[in-house]
Amino acid sequence: MKLYTLTAVALTTALAAGTATADLVMPDLSYRTGPYAAGGIPFSDGYQDYLNMLNARDGGIGGEELRIIECETGYNTEKGVECYESTKGEGALIYQPLSTGITYQLIPKATADKIPLHTMGYGRTSAANGEVFNWVFNYPANYWDAAGVIVNYLLDENGGDLKGKKVALVYHNSAYGKEPIRTLEALSAEHGFDFNPIAVDHPGQEQKSQWLQIRRERPDYVLMWGWGVMNQVAIQEAANIGFPMENFIGNWWSGAEHDVTPAGDGANGYKSLNMNRIGDLPVFADIKKHVHDAGNAAGDGSNLGTVLYTRGMYAAMLAQEAIASAQKIHGVSDVTAAMVRDGMEALAITADRMKELGMENIGPAFDVSCENHGGSGLGIVQQWNATDSKWVALTDYIEPNKAVTDPLIAEDSAAFAEENGITPACFKG
Amino acid sequence: MSADFLYGIEVILNGLMAGVMYALVALGFVLIFKASGIFNFAQGVMALFAALTLVGIMEGQIPFSHLINEIFGTKIHNFGWEVPALLAIALTLLVMVAFAWAVQQFLFKHLVGQEPIILFMATIGLAYFLEGMGDLMWGSNIKTLDLGLPQGGSRVIEELSANLGGDDFYGFFIDKLDMVASVVAIILVLALIAFSQYTKHGRAMRAVADDHQAALSVGISLNFIWVLVWSLAGLVALVAGVMWGAKSGVQFSLSLIALKALPVLMLGGFTSIPGAIVGGLIIGVGEKLFEYTVGPMIGGATENWFAYVLALLFLVFRPQGLFGEKIIERV
């Protein structure tokens, strides 16, 4: 008798699980532990809180509830791949691994499994070429765009002339950190500035040699492609050697609150890029009401409104819009991963839509197409005000240098296509 | 003097300071290995845990608050008070002593007589357990450690030395925090040597380190000595955690500082306190000089691997390390 009961329970559970897979499955490959947790936690909190808010406020997207599956990667590539493998069978619609290393491993896997990857502002830059990377998207901007935005900002600061200026790049000695070097070399040739890349090994806890070198060579500007503890140590070391902080500019992964607070007043004036605006957005009130006050916050609720929380929320919003776009294209609410890919490729983010979503001007307006999976590439420059403990936007959205980066993207993606036997073409289904 | 020569001296000075920071971590390994033959993989995590605890206590954070809130639906985070630094350090030391007692009572007491590899594996488990415990108790966010330690380069040294070279020499850069760390390390080493030479428990500790069966036969409690040794390693971990945490904020990557201690141990020997210091200095100077002279030619970022190359070179010629005890096994 007990055996029959157990069988009945198992069947009911299996049926219930079957019902659950009808939801819109959103994996969250997060990292809440390990050396990079400080960056992973706010991003994941923002991502999950926004999706949970959609469930609580709107009943999901297009009437379909969202089901979040969180998997801890520890920012470790092997664990990230394991997370992908263990969650893809659940009907995952879109992956955002928040790691360039994991992204590189997932590109062939997701392409074979026909699940879209969205790597906003990280990952393989040449994935912006949608004719080669049918299943990978890196809108609204990529690393090479970031390099272009910084150089355009410096040009603006220097009356349009960087000739003879010395620009150093302090970078994480990894696939991520090395990404902008090619672009910066091309930009250095174009604008006549002296470019010097300086590598910092993982994790970046000890950077004395690099900053002594900077002190000796006295560059006019130091750029940074860092992540994790490398950011905090670099900012502290820059303050230690008395480097003018207003001439020290990080990319958008080197510009969160926790990157600057350990250096205290020494970090005042440090600048970084951002791909999304920061500030008090109306959508935060909805998240607070429907998620935090209901006791369903992904974390402890303290990250609401921070740089990386806002970016995680922005990533979730872009996923939401892609799903809604897919639902519209295919005329069904219960969309598949392949349909979401179509939705991503037809994505059009407008100023009106962002305002309607309670995120006015959170990012630039942009369109995605088969040829361009990379968006507009715009970014802002923000500056840390240590007295008020907040980031202040210094500029409006700045254009990247597409004239330099587009040929590099074409060249790199063509090499990838040749290596992998891909004939570049728009995806036909 | 030429600027290149002076900058070379600057690199050596900074290498010495960095070496002291590495030695601070290595000391904890040496203490435990010398007294019990255990290579404590958890030493780096102990530094992290000690620093987390110190900041948590100073800020009046309620331990396990996230867990408590999840279970009971409460919204508590802080006691509402701040604890002065000295009292917080004392309380953190008490926590580290309690940790030492717990490690002995619940783990190593049950592993007496086991192979060294088993004990090593136990410390790996301990490292991950402690890292998880630190996360549960104090959270994963980066914490700012404000003990009032000086930061930044010494302007006095910079200005005094600026005239030694030409216009392209800007004076020696010496980090004030590194100078403090060096003084603290010297005091710590002297205190540890004085403790082991001139106190009853210190002598007992040395007796256990020399021959624990003989020590047992004369009435020395191994249990007590091992708790004492783990407590001292906890103290060293706290000092290392504070010095490293002051640079980067207290965060989970602090546990990786153990990686900087391994070549120091290989070079200086696993059983010698002076060896940890000398090993740290050689590694610090060696890796910094290599990065300064060869690094630019091969793309930089050489320090992590060159430290191990240096240690391996010493290992080939002196397997027990510079100051380690030569292992003689009679068959």
Image: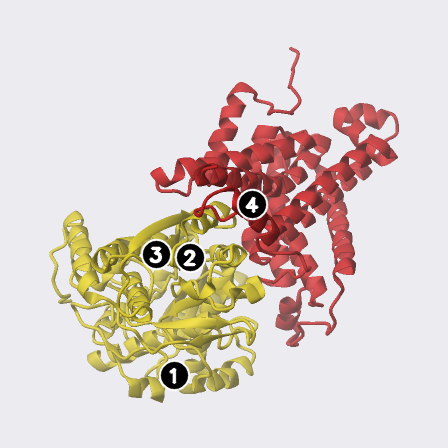
Residue at the disc numbered 4: B161
* Residue A226: mark: 2
Q: What is the quadrant of residue B266 in the picture? A: top right
Q: How far across and how far down the image is residue A405, in percent?
A: 21, 61
Q: Is residue B315 above or below residue A397?
A: above
Distance Cα–Cα, label 2 vs label 1: 27 Å
Classify mark 2: residues with Cα within 10 Å, few (<14), some (14-19) or many (20+): many
Quarter of the image with the C terminus of chain B in it:
top right
Return the disc, 2 or 3, that comes first in the chain's sequence: 3
Query: Crowdedness of circle 4 by 10 Å Cα count: few (<14), some, many (20+)?
Result: some
Image: A23 above or below A134: below
Mark number, residue A359: 1
Element class at badge 2: loop
- Report how far apart the C-alphas of labels 4 and 1 lie in the structure: 55 Å
Q: Are marks 4 and 2 on the same chain?
A: no
Provide the chain ID for the residue under circle 4.
B
Residue indicated by mark 3: A167
User: Is B256 in front, or is A214?
Assistant: A214
Q: Which chain is yellow?
A: A
Q: Residues within 10 Å of mark 3 (few under 14, many from 20)?
A: many
